[in-house]
Image (spheres, rainbow, N blue to C red):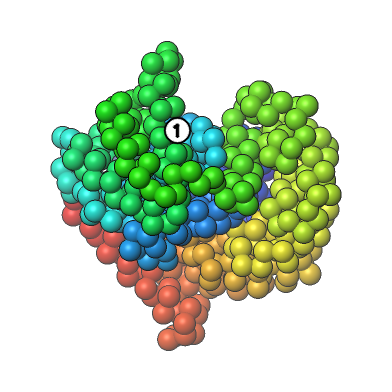
Amino acid sequence: MPEAAAASRPLAFSRHSAYRRDMPPMLLRRSAVRAAFAAALVLAAPGRAEEVLRDTETEALFRDVARPLIIAAGLNPASVQIILVGDPEINAFAGGGQNVFVFSGLIENADNVNWLQGVLAHELGHIAGGHNVRSGEATSRANHISILSLIAAVGLAVAGAPEAGLAALGLGTATAEADVLAYSREQESRADEAGAGFLAKAGLSGRGSIGFFNKLLGLEYRAGIPQANSYGRTHPLDGERIAVLQHVYETSPAWNTPPDPVLDARFQRVKAKLVGFVESPARAFQVYPETLKTEPARYAHAYAWHKGAYPDAAVAEADALLALHPADPYYLELKGQILLESGQPKTAIPVLRAAVAAAPKAPLIATLLGHALISTDDAADLAEAKPLLRQAVIRDRENPFAWYELGVVYEHEGDEARAALATAERYDLEGDPKRAAMNAKIALGGLPTGSRDWLRADDIAQVEQNALAKKKRK
Ligand SMILES: [Zn+2]
């Protein structure tokens, strides 16, 4: 389908569309290369820099790395979210309640998982300390909105309307964000101190944190490294602060404890995957030379080959990884994705089925299988996709891509009311109240009054109408 067709048809489920074979509009708006990765590493919030990346393996790693630190901080692991931002800056910050945003550039520049632990401990120090971010010239209300809309933008624009996602981000430029998210030096010291305590309590060394700070300081002296929005900007950094911190870390019995090898192996995989995904193929092969045959290297290579439009080479790397771990859900996901994105949905389906079987509670992987199933134009495949996608949105509501696919399934069944409800959910997530309200009303007209779906449609219609009214008053 030509890009223009997607752009001129903003309503996802116009009744007469040949949608089942279409790529989601968002995929068309991105370059083919980026699109190839979009389903597994779902690009959620678009923009020049700040885009939220979603990936099951990465999110599972973040949860497991953060958990002991969150507990040490006296917080609830279920309430703290670690969110990956696709941005080459070496940065991380806490914001919008109990959320820690970690930039892909930070992961790429971390030597091992202990570096990430150090950063998370510090950011949790800000959260546990209830530090309000200093807003520079911005009012506190404005920065509140910016940060909250950044959260709201998680999962946005996956199935279209990147502009809406960008608007919802409300950040504009990277500089604006750095202005909004600067902590005071006093808050920095307190977060350092608190973070050191969390690390010690969790039995983790502060070495990674020192390594990270030293690397940042070193980078500041190097030409060509953008510092405007780096960690050093949001978290003022100097040699004295590092020296004080190191002294505190050294008093912990965990100072000489090496990183957990299993956790670090998972970290190295995620790091390689990110390098393959975020960087150009040339850069990926620079970081992980072709002669290198380690698991992380092969992982990076698979993405780099795929990105460079060499699906056979990409599949060969995925197969080499699967030879080592035949039931690894993420390697299966990778292979399925390469096949799917290189136009082989029928071949991708059994591979993705195996991925879902290996990770049955992973809605993003289920969504990828759903995507493969609805692109075959086969009634049996659609029937298989339906329960998968329903489960996916139950487990992870903030997945417009899954709502899009579910809408396609309902559309095929002739269930226009539920197709409209799924579309309303999608637009709700995309921050498009007008279209959300419109579709919710269509759904209300066709659903049995008082049923659960009817109540949900009614809910969306009211919320979106309020949002629209609010918009008009401004
Ligand atoms: Zn800080």
Task: Name the residue: 27% across, 28% down.
Answer: 240
Front-most of 231 and 21?
231
Q: Is residue 42 above or below residue 292?
A: below
Indicate left or right for 439 with 303 as reference.
left
Task: Name the residue: 83% across, 53% down.
Answer: 347
- Ligand 1 picture quarter: top left
Indicate left or right for 444 with 2 as reference.
left
For the residue with label 1, is its CB less than 8 Å from the closest atom of ligand 1?
A: no
Residue 459 in view (yes/no): yes
Q: Position of residue 396 (x, y in %)?
A: 51, 64
User: In terms of secondary structure, where does tag 1 sit?
Assistant: helix
Indicate left or right for 144 with 295 as reference.
left
Q: How many marks?
A: 1
Q: Position of residue 14 (x, y in %)?
A: 56, 58
Hey, which quadrant is residue 203 in on the image? bottom left
Task: Categorize mark 1 by other alpha carbons within 10 Å: few (<14), some (14-19), many (20+).
Answer: some
